[in-house]
Amino acid sequence: MSVRIAARLSLCTLAVLTLWLALLPPVSGQRALALDSIRDDVTVTSLDNGLTVILAPKDGAPVATVNAWIGVGSMHEPPEHNGIAHFFEHMIFYGSEEYAGTVDAVIEGWGGTSNASTSFDWTQYYITVPSQHVEDAVAMLADMLINGHYTEQDLQTERDVVLREGDQRNDDPDSYLAYQSWEAFYGDHPYGQPILGTTETVSSITLETFEEWLDTYYVPNNMTVIVAGDFDPDAALQAVDNAFGGMEPRELPEFNPPELSPRTAIETLEIARDIEQERVRLMWRGPAAQDLDDQIALDVLLYVLSGGRSSRIYRDIVRDLGVVTSADAGYFTTQLPSIFQLSAQYPPERAGVVRAALLDQMERVLDGDLTEEEVETAKTVLIAQWDRSAERSRSIASTLGFYATVMGQPNFAFEYLDRIRTITPDDIVQMARKYVDLGSQLEVRMVPMDAEAPAADTSEDLMVLDNGLRLILRQDTSTNVVAFQTFVGTGTSVETAANSGISTFTNALMLRGTEDQTEEEIFLDIENLGATLGQSQLPDMANVTLVATADTWTEAFPIYVDVLTRPAFTEEEFNRLKTERLLDLEASLDDKFGVIYDQLLAGLYGDSGYGSPELGTLDTIEALTLDNVKEFHSRHYVPDNMVISVTGNVDPQLLALRLESAFESLEGTGDSIEHGSRTIDLAATMEPTVARPDANLAWIVMGYPAPGVGDDDYAVMKVINSIVGSGAASRMFTTLREEQGLAYSTGSFFPSRSGTSHLALYAIVLPDNKESTIAGIRAILQDVAENGVDQDELDLAVNREIGSFIRRRETSSGRAFDIGWYEMLGAGIQLDAEYPDRLRAVTTEDVQRVAADYFNRFHVVSVLEPEASE
């Protein structure tokens, strides 16, 4: 049985429209099937027992979705069992007597996929399959919903999963703020109950509670079944009747939620958290699902405010004001009145400016400042999004099911298109005036616990130019070397699955020639000066290095600046590097550790951000164009996304003048950099495995979530890494290799990351020793978590880490690298001086506490093993 985490809808979306739009494929050059084209083929039928059946056939790919919507969500829950709707949604996937623990395997065997989600008003389940399995999917979904079979052990297992999901929500500042804001806005109203419940309420739920919930709400007169895609309507309707028609209808409990009391003044709530940047939400009551015209007008307004890079909030606040990390407008459609909100994330000292800027955006709308051009653009985009979404059966089913359940009008999906075309700027202004009073909002701020903490740029070693470029200059007259380290905030952290590898490709191409010199000329000049020039790639940044002497740095410096600011990016060099990179990727398949480590990262982080392979993939590099590289360079290689660190025998005043002269003319963008996945949010422990005919040994790497470099427990995890797997005195080496003889090679590493990092533990073993080794590694980690370490072992590990830190800084290049690296990671240059003391401050209690925290989390076990013999 695979553990499932239900899909969760964001509270900051472009209305319920996002339920559909979130599933959209990328826009293609060819016009997608218009939603209007399936309107006449949609039928709505009621079975004798009251179950609603919606059939939405369409021509296209041989794929269909079976989707069941139940009209019950968190707002229907008794307070003592808050969270049961979501918890029960998890339990459904344990299957029935026929499919006990095999639901996922059977669906995947059909070539399909499935999932579910719970909200305030509804719970929904879907199965998407090739068309020949539509009737099978109908039968299975009915069996799961009607004949669910779960044991006490299943209950306990899934309870832990649900509770951990709640823990993960609480650990994430944005998710925590969303739920706290929602509860604060609604108070005792049923919408104020958290969808996930609380530890106390979830812990109180029993199998008997589930039975009562099923009998009460999972009844045909409270259900809608949708089949959408390529299928035979007559056969599908018969399949639904056969599978669901035997259910007995029951009278639903009377449910009369109270009216939401209007606010008459500004109310504020402040939440203190261990965060670096402050967040704010300005919240007003929004339309209910039945307020159709208001809902559509708000959709259009949301796009005008924050729908894209031409939107008002992006243009005026994110780009031009340049004081926020992000800003947005949002609304989530619900059956009862919902919430319209403006939100932002920013440095704490900018709170007043940001609040005023957000309120100014709304004041302009309320004053009637809304152009015909803005509204028509928004309408065109929204209609096009609906058109594109009609290509996917899952999108069609979800939308029809939502409107049928929440609004009682499945065909509103089609009416939406008719109504949105008639919306005018005046309609939007009148709607805004109806709901938004700038003197009666709820304002929720999440602030850092220590708002008075000194900022990272207060050190005398750090200069910040007007364009945002950070310069770190440290003179060292004990050496004759001068080292320049430039860091640019790129790396895999800014990549998506579609452009994987672009960061390292761009950085490498920069050294292939400038506007004035070819690659050969650059390196001939550098080598004649006895200098070195190179580049490297890290998950959070790119790095370009120049090392020269005190006598030659002034001659090498202009070449270095040209490489950074004026790369030629010629078609010839692009094609040459592309050919080399494709060969490198083919060769990388022979690197067995590289294969399992990439597999581990993808398991931990997904297919973007930290989960993206550094070199990319054969597909992404093959698809890469020179224009892609140029755009990536112009977007990211800008002064306010760069740090230059210099250490060595150089006059700091002269150096400062040279650096300012070289870089002050560059313009910062003020834009926030968009990142891929930099967090780990596992729903279960994963064990991806690849079998290779050329392997004789089993290659294992296990990855556990670990703190980022700015976390208070960063130094503690560095020490733990040393204890468990780094070096010949580590527990993995002494236990698995020396005492038990299980592993040929063992080790661990804990990379420094701006976001969530990971502890990687690896071993190379005989295939027969694979399971014993994995169990052995887990036993080592659990022993540290449960029994801790003694002072001698701790002291040894601390000394080993301090020694490694000191050795790395033996050269000017190493010192310049560390200082700039820490600053770029967001930890600040002070970490360079404080790090040894932070290591010395680690206690045995710290080690056990952090180990118990992280080693009891879901993790990934990545394996490469020999192919099984015939």
Image (cartoon, rainbow, N blue to C red):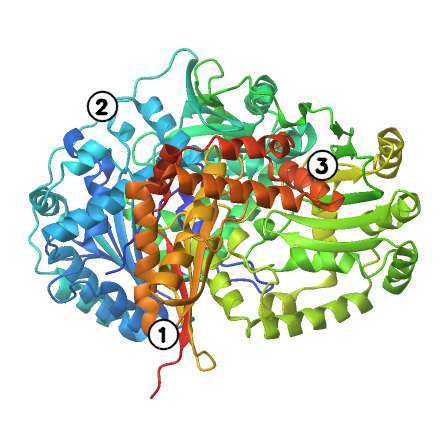
Residue position marked by numbered label 2 in the rendering = 258
Label drawn at residue 767: 1
> Mark 3 near mark 1, Cβ–Cβ under 8 Å?
no
Residue 278 seen in render? yes
> Which residue is at the front of the view, 660 or 128?
660
Marks 2 and 3, how far apart at CA? 51 Å
Label 2 neighbour load within 10 Å: few <14, some 14-19, many 20+: few
Q: Which badge, 2 or 3, comes first in the chain's sequence?
A: 2
The answer to whether 71 is drawn above or below residue 838 in the figure is below
Residue position marked by numbered label 3 in the rendering = 640
Q: Amino acid at mark 2?
A: Pro
Figure quadrant of the N terminus: bottom left
Task: Name the secondary structure under disc 1.
Answer: helix
Residue mark closest to the camera, 3 vs 1: 1
Q: Amino acid at mark 3?
A: Asp
> Mark 1 near mark 2, Cβ–Cβ under 8 Å?
no
